[in-house]
Amino acid sequence: MTTSDITIKYSNSDFTLDVNFPLPTQGISGLFGPSGSGKTTLIRCLAGLERPHEAHIKVGNSFWQSDDIFLPAHKRRVGLVFQDVRLFGHLNVQGNLLFGHKRTAVEDRKISFDDVLEILDLAPLLKKRPENLSGGEAQRVAIGRALLTSPALLLMDEPLAALGEQHKKDILPYLRKIPQNFGIPMLYVSHDFNEMASLTRDIIVLQRGEIHARGRIENIAAKLPDVMAQWTPDNIITGQTDADGNVTLSDGQVIEGVLPSNSKTSPNNATNIILNARDITLLPAIPEQHAGIALLTGNIQATQPMSKDQLMVILSVSGQEVQTFLAHNENRPSWLDPGNDVHLIINRIKLETD
């Protein structure tokens, strides 16, 4: 995977930011840390809203800042989405969406208006004014407006922090679609570890203006005992629906009768199934009977101690990564060795429809 190169040294009277990291040019990268750790300052420096006294910012093949270069914010192809949606009150949704698009050079327009409407489900909102939108709808409009500038990098600074839990859950599926549909890398900022984990497997942890840790999210979680106790990662696996409410995975495994009768999902549609790590029971052999919703087979890819008595098991199920937890001690059984097939009792699922 190719990367952008980021080095920033910034200081004011009461805070210093000193970071250096590669930023993938595809997918979602997470930036996690407590309030005051430097997350927003880093975002503002990347966007050109703050000028660090020393920086090397190269995004793709473009230099935004170096020893003798400083591109101002309006010349950086960056999309910004904040907690405060900052929609223009005098414009309806369509006007807000087209604001940045009209100000983007024709040769730089890579994303179409119609594609944004479809991916973010904005067509029903076009004539509405911002004051008539729910919090979740307004945030989707703000995301769409940022996308229509066809950015080289999308920066999201705690965009869901002001929303209730249900609105957060409603928007997360839209966020996951952005990199795969538009090919735009995203740096996503949050102080909510579960929210972060639902979007990305790779994160940077900031503390007091420095990088405390960087890497796979399960490795990071093992180093952060204060978040480990509350972390309940969701796994998302994709299958194909049928007329009987079943979902078939790519390797032929079937989860039966999971779609409610009033589901909006049509037969033969791709459906995302959400399996929380704590709703999975792992067994070395097929049980004679079980009370779960489904029984699946997976292959162990790796194990990661998360604490002195808890082990994360990373599996491949139908070619898709699934994480779950097991109680463990120093005498780890051999059936947990990487490469072994195991069986998963699924005790509860949620659905997320594409």
Image (spheres, rainbow, N blue to C red):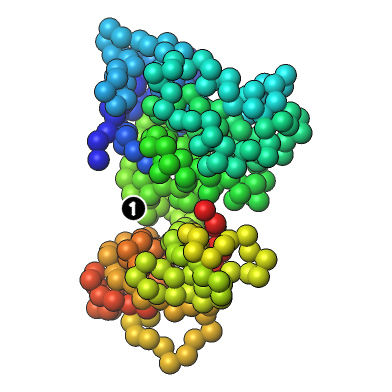
* Image position of 245 with respect to 179: above or below: below
* Image position of 301 with respect to 156: above or below: below
Tell which of 269 and 180 is nearer to you: 269
Give the residue type at disc 1: Asn
| Image location of residue 172, percent across then percent down | 54, 47
Asked whether, in this view, residue 339 is left or right of residue 272, the answer is left
Look at the image and tell me whether residue 316 can be seen: yes
Instruction: Read off the residue under disc 1.
Output: 219
* Corner quadrant of residue 260: bottom right
Tell which of 162 and 3 is nearer to you: 3
Count of numbered tags = 1
Specify the quadrant that holds the N terminus: top left
Q: What residue is shown at x 54% (from left), y 57% (from top)?
A: 352
Mark 1 closeness class: few <14, some 14–19, many ≥20 residues within 10 Å: some
Dot 1: what SS? helix
| Image location of residue 126, percent across then percent down | 67, 32
Tell which of 212 and 340 is nearer to you: 340
* Image position of 162 with respect to 170: above or below: above
| Image location of residue 297, percent across then percent down | 36, 76
Look at the image and tell me whether residue 11 can be seen: no
Q: What residue is shown at x 29% (from left), y 27% (from top)?
A: 60
Q: What residue is shown at x 35% (from left), y 20% (from top)?
A: 9
Q: What residue is shown at x 48% (from left), y 74% (from top)?
A: 255
| Image location of residue 276, percent across then percent down | 50, 64
Tell which of 58 and 137 is nearer to you: 137
